[in-house]
Amino acid sequence: MLVELATRLDRSRFEPFVCCMKPRPGDHEHSFVAQLTEADIPIEFADISSQISMPLGLWRLRNVFKNRKPDICQSFLFHANLFSRLAAKAAGVPVVISGVRVAEKEKKWHLRLDCMTQSLVDQYICVSQDVAEFTAQTGRIPLQKITVIPNGIDVADYENAQKSDLTQFGCLPYTRKVIVIGRLHRQKGIDWLLQTLPNWLEFRNDCELLIVGDGPERAVLEQTAAQQPWRNRIHFLGHRRDIPELLAASELLLLPSRWEGMPNVVMQAMAAGLPVVATHVEGIDELLVQQSATSGGDPTALPQICRFGDTDDFTTKINRLLDDENLHRITRIQNKEYIRQNFRIEKMINEYEQLWLSFFEKQSGATTP
């Protein structure tokens, strides 16, 4: 989202540059440096690689702000939020805006530090209403400092994608593909997903499970999957950049997360015309609940939502969407149309631009063109 935002800004009004807290990545295949460079966007690196390097990295960031003199500092994710607000205020940057991308339910010290330094922040941008409520209630950030700007995607990337040839990963050409995409971390609930497989994958010889992503739990998850009798139908694809093509070759997306913010992968799957079975985490209300008026106040009554840990409901909904061709077809159409109407990337960019311009007008006392 940071790269999408930086590269799509109206360059007649904004001159972006990007700061990365870490050193310049050596793995060019998995970094976004090339995309930013091709868009003629300068990139600075604070070179923070350990706790020892944090003070020097903070000093480097302050110097970047001193030299470039930005009107607004917009940051994303906890560490960038914390370091940039300290460096920006020390360098005299007029406006500091922090982006809250997830409801942090694991590292409570993140919330404490954020709250302790919130006086340095002019505005918080939350990616969903759920995250905004969490930030205000649990994070104790003043409500008047919070704005909600949902993520957006380029719908055309998913509508026009060609199907990936999944035989390269050992998949059979005639099976139906169920896909999971995300960092292999406890947050994403892949460990629970593997526990549910006896309730659906074991009996579905027509299906294969694709797990896309990398992360700290990959080795443990692969070991768990290798012990299953249907292990030949579970494929770990690692980090991939061809997500539209993988979604085009799949029939169903699963999101078994414990917590989220505004899951991009659900928006991507919906834009690709896939049904979804997701846990009722942050951001799901905006994506899967508001398009339906049939839940009777209980989101988990909808065919695409369940509670985390409710294996029976989760697997029932997987099997139903795979078996009921009419439900599968209607859900595909509804998901695709809802994203097209409500979560286009252009809408997200415009909302960021309008917020930044409102602060610029306050600072300058002038009306922008």
Image (tube, helix red, strand yellow):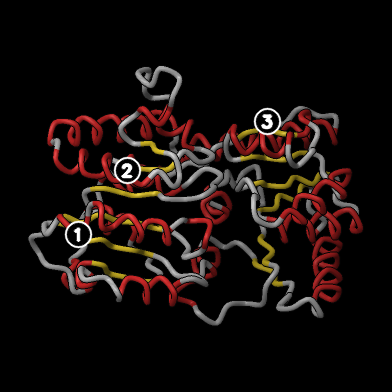
Amino acid on which the number 2 mark rests in the picture = Asp
Residue 85 versus residue 40 in the image, above or below: above
Q: Helix or strand or loop: what does disc 2 sit on?
A: helix
Q: Helix or strand or loop: what does disc 3 sit on?
A: loop
Q: Say which mark, if any, is on residue 202.
A: 1
* Label 2 to label 3: alpha-carbon separation: 56 Å
What residue appears at the point 54 percent right and 69 percent down from the top-left corner?
33
Q: Counting other residues with Cα less than 10 Å from the Cα at mark 3, is it few (<14), some (14-19), or many (20 or more)? A: few
Q: Quadrant of the C terminus?
A: top right
- Residue 70 lies left or right of residue 14; in this view the side is right
- Residue 297 lies left or right of residue 315; in this view the side is right
User: Closer to us: mark 2 or mark 3?
Assistant: 2
Q: Say which mark, if any, is on residue 250.
A: none
Task: Please tell me in which quadrant of the rendered image residue 119 appears.
Answer: top right
Q: Are marks 3 and 1 in contact (CB under 8 Å)?
A: no
Amino acid on which the number 1 mark rests in the picture = Glu
Q: Which residue in the protein does label 2 denote?
A: 312
First-in-chain label (2 vs 1) = 1
Image position, residue 35 (x, y; %)? 49, 64
Residue 357 versus residue 73 in the image, above or below: above
Q: Which residue in the protein does label 3 denote?
A: 369
